[in-house]
Amino acid sequence: MERLRDSNEFIGGFIPRKQRAKILIGFLGISILVLSLRLFSLQVMKASYYKRISDENRIRLVPLQAPRGIITDQNGRVITFNRPSYTVFLIPYEVKNLDFVAERLAPLLNLDLSTLKERLKANWSRRYEPIKLKKDVDFKTICVIEEQNQDLPGVIYQVEQIRRYPDCGWAGHVLGYVRELSKEELSSDSVSSAEKSDFSESTSLKLSPAERRGYRPGGYIGRKGVEKQYDDLLRGKEGGTFLEITAAGKIIGPLEDREPDLPVKGTDIKLTLDLDLQVEAESALMNYESAAVVAIDPANGEILALVSKPGFDANLLAGALSSAEWNEILQNPLHPLLSRTVQATYAPGSTLKLLTAAIALESGIANKNTYLAPCNGSYRFGRRTFRCWRPEGHGRLNLVDAIIHSCDVYFYQLGLKVGLEEWCRYAKLCGFAEKVGVDLPDEVKGFVPSLEYYNKKYGKGEWVKNLVINLSIGQGEILVTPLQMASFYCGLATDGTIYRPHILKEITSPDGRVSIAQSEVWRHLPFSSATLGVLKEAMVGVVNDKDGTGVLAQIPDVTVAGKTGTAQNPHGEDHAWFVGYAPAKDPKIVVAVVMENIGHGGTFAAPVAKRIIDKYLKRGIVAERADSVLAGDTP
Ligand SMILES: [Zn+2]
């Protein structure tokens, strides 16, 4: 109250002299306090901040590359390693005439002169900072640069480790590749400085999530495949050495009070992939443009081979790729960067007739000897006629024979008995429309329709029955990935247990510790062993009966089981499918093959599956030969 009155008096100007002096002293006191607090803040609380700012003008961090972990197949054969390469830089400070140097360098480095000049001009103001001219320059060119160093002032080169992938582009989609991170990619998602890591403390005040994980501009990041999936393991930890520089950026020398941070090597990765089998699968598809193969050990979910065609040359993508080359890849109508095994979805065609059969068996709608109306080449339902693939018809068939001959008319009738809702419910229980959860990036989940989906799309009505006719033979709205199809057959080949497909077998950390990846069950098919027994009998018949649709998958002395499919494709020729396993009694391998726009599954996909199965079951004989072929190309 007292203070309030004083202040009123002050405003009114009626202040006694004694009190005025007190107020003046009070003001002075407050001012000194404010100044002191400000000084305290500047000198003490923000000292580290200002020191850092000062350090940034004085210190340059030169990264020390960490050797990336190597990747081997399940037998320890090296499939991806590091090799030294030369990167050429130019330091503007040492160059008197930009045009003169650019004109000499462009032909030497095989660069476009105007592009080179533009890049140099854009970076010319930072006089002391090396401008990267070209990566992966061959040794011969480096020798020329050495010879002409008098005429090429400011041109320097540095040895960098770059990735070496198998030639011919095989296994490209499994392995992926590494590429340099651009500044734009790094900063696309910035976060507050409070969350930053120790590593980058002296280099940046605001860090993106990528930077917090230890990435920096010009560093490498895994793209696609195993390189992307296990990038955090493979890349290790980059180190750095500290240089003292002037405010203008000129290097004085190594920073005296700071030891270099030594890089930590990346973790080595052993895949479940079988190199012999991968080569065989790639060779079997040599003459085809677009196709996918998945081979899995059904006993544990280990992926033995994985092919997606067209592939890409990972060495090219990881090296010095021109923008013209990159655009050519992006504009290729066959989409070589699409990993068809996990990212592409297809109508499964008749390979999914086993699902319709399994539902009918499990629900008691049919048994193995159930006969339906004979096939005369087509089936009339309502006002529509649905055709069998065999125009002359199959006549009278039971369930097992209908699978062996892949009779569409039998399955139209069976699908109608099962009903749309039940069919879709079982499809989902079997894992369709769900990601398998493989340890590879960008897996998609496919699609299984539902009654609600159709009601929304077409409105309620009798059409529902037409739709199940299509679904029962793997056509219509259903879409699956080759990996899902292989997984489903892993369940059919065993007692219904499906292990989660995976590509990682074990890792070896830089200190030599080995950790083995554990297999885990993904799901159990909702079918009894009696139901699975009927399907198995039929799948053996598909390949081994003289009239079976899959006879081209036969292997002498080995009983192969499986199912063909010829999936209609609205964009062109039919896609050919074969999914099968062997030996029938004790399956060691499940193979799914899909070949785009080519025709019958039995004609094209079955022989490819046969080659892969044959190779795998007899691999002991050929492993030595593959070793000798590889030996010259490993570090
Ligand atoms: Zn038929």
Image (cartoon, helix red, strand yellow):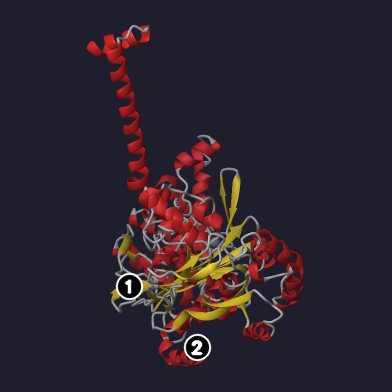
In the depicted structure, whether residue 449 falls above or below residue 348: above
Determine the secondary structure under disc 1.
loop
**Amino acid on which the number 1 mark rests in the picture:** Ala
Task: Tell me: 212 left or right of 250.
Answer: left
Determine the secondary structure under disc 2.
helix
In the image shown, does 160 or 267 lie closer to the viewer? 160
In the image shown, does 159 or 494 lie closer to the viewer? 159
In the image shown, does 166 or 202 lie closer to the viewer? 202
Residue 253 visible, this angle: yes
Q: Quadrant of residue 291?
A: bottom right
Residue at the spot of label 1: 299
Residue at the spot of label 2: 630
Residue 213: image location, x then y, percent: 41, 59
Q: Nearer the viewer, mark 1 or mark 2?
A: 2
Instruction: State the separation of the CA atoms marked 1 and 2.
Output: 29 Å
Label 2: few (<14), some (14–19) or many (≥20) C-alpha neighbours in 10 Å: some
Residue 449: image location, x then y, percent: 47, 47
Q: Give the mark count.
A: 2
Residue 435 visible, this angle: no
Q: Look at the numbered discs 1 and 2 and tell me whether their residues touch, using CB distance below 8 Å.
A: no
In the depicted structure, whether residue 37 falls above or below residue 561: above
Q: Earlier in the sequence, mark 1 or mark 2?
A: 1
In the image shown, does 126 or 424 lie closer to the viewer? 126
